[in-house]
Image (cartoon, rainbow, N blue to C red):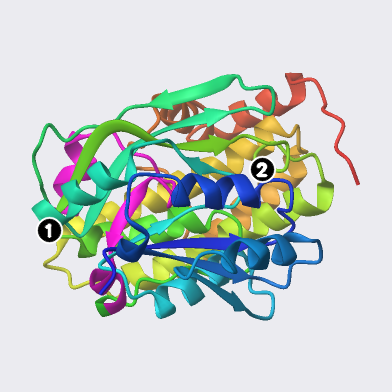
Amino acid sequence: MKKLSVIIPVYNVERYIEKCIGSVLNNDLAENDFEIIVVNDETPDNSLAIVESIAAKHANIIVISQQNKGLGGARNTGIKNATGEYILFLDADDWINPGMLSKTLSEARNAQVDMLEFGAEGITPDGKITYHNSLSSEGKSCNGFDYTQHYNYMWSACNKLYRTQFLKDNALYFMEHIYFEDLEFFTRLIPKASKIQAIPEIVASFYQSGDSITRNTSTAKKQKAYRDIVTIAQNLHDHYIKIDHSKKNEQGFYLQYLGILVVTLFFQFFKNSESFELAKAYRKELQDKDLYYIGHKIIPSHKDWFRRIFLKNFMLFRILLLVKPKKKIAD
């Protein structure tokens, strides 16, 4: 059995994939200790040829091609084919920093955690560090609820190691063809985890491109992102109503994250200078579907402030949209 499976979805990443795979191969693990599962998600560019050229020289690289299922679907294929004790998701434009894999994997295996979270940094195309998140649970392991209450964490799926059997036993897979899949996955994972730990080392670097949905100016992509938030909220609500009433922690956790989704949606409306009519229509839809949860405190603090001031006083939100300068959105 391998110690680690690194899962890398591939779609339109010919500029980045060689660096990404190289950062894993040239780290500090012996090649027979890990496998790299590259999932070709019907990439239209030269990414597959680059991957196959690298794989021809390394027996521990497995290439799987499938019909396009999006980032979440590609990760799911990786999970189902993983043979490692732990799984690491790595987006093809990101990389692992030198000398980090062995220590990170040892921490997870020694503590036998369901999930190990590690630090990460964001880097722009010109090399500027946009954030530097060093996380720590102070050498302690705890269940998912306690972890999210007492320690800082990230919603990203890619700054963590996951025990493979834990994911498979709990059917923890990603939604397909959807934005914000990491937040949805994280919300379902936390109540299932009995042992989580975090280490402060900056293990991964995440490339901050203009293609991110939070930075993209495409009208079509923005509209899809808005609809996807509603879809995810509905999915989480469907899970919530099935929770036994005796599990108050789990119920409260789901309500908190439904609130995060609602605030994220309206915060995006504000950032993108959308019309009040659009915001009002979404608010009515969420209310009609019993999804408009804004009663729970959320993180980060600036979004909780936004929740308390503007979403609980919707006419103030209307004024906020009116006074904000309009932003040009691409077609």
Task: Give residue 212's mark.
Answer: 2
Nearest the camera: 93 or 3?
3
Q: Amino acid at mark 1?
A: Gln
- Whether residue 183 is visible, yes or no, is yes
Q: Badge 2: how crowded within 10 Å, few (<14), some, or many (20+)?
A: few
User: Around disc 1, counting alpha carbons within 10 Å, would you say few (fewer than 14), some (14 to 19), or many (20 or more)?
Assistant: some
Residue at the image position 60 percent from the left and 44 percent from the top: 19
Q: CA distance from mark 2 to mark 1?
A: 34 Å
- Is 58 left or right of 315, judged from the image as shown? left
Q: Nearer the viewer, residue 276 or 32?
A: 32
* Residue at (68, 44) in percent of width and height: 279
Viewer-closest of 200 and 277: 200
Q: Which residues are magenta?
A: 143-168
Residue found farthest to the front = 57
Residue 105 location (% of width, % of height): 25, 51
From this viewpoint, which residue is outermost toward the right? 331
Q: Residue at x 62, y 30 (%)?
A: 317
Residue 272 position within the rendered picture, expressed as x and y whole percent measured from the top left? 73, 34
Residue at 21% across / 34% down in the picture? 151
Task: Tell me residue 132's x, y (percent).
Answer: 43, 24
Q: Which residue is mark 1?
A: 112
The answer to whether 318 appears left or right of 229 in the picture is right
Cβ atoms at labels 2 and 1 below 8 Å apart: no
Does the segment drawn in magenta span residue 305? no
Q: Is residue 88 above or below residue 43?
A: above
Which is closer to the viewer, label 2 or label 1? Answer: 1
SS of the residue at dot 1? loop
Q: Secondary structure at mark 2?
A: loop
Amino acid at pointer 2: Ser
Question: Going by the image, does 59 lie left or right of 176?
Answer: left
* Quadrant where the image shows the N terminus: bottom left
Q: Is residue 58 above or below residue 157?
A: below
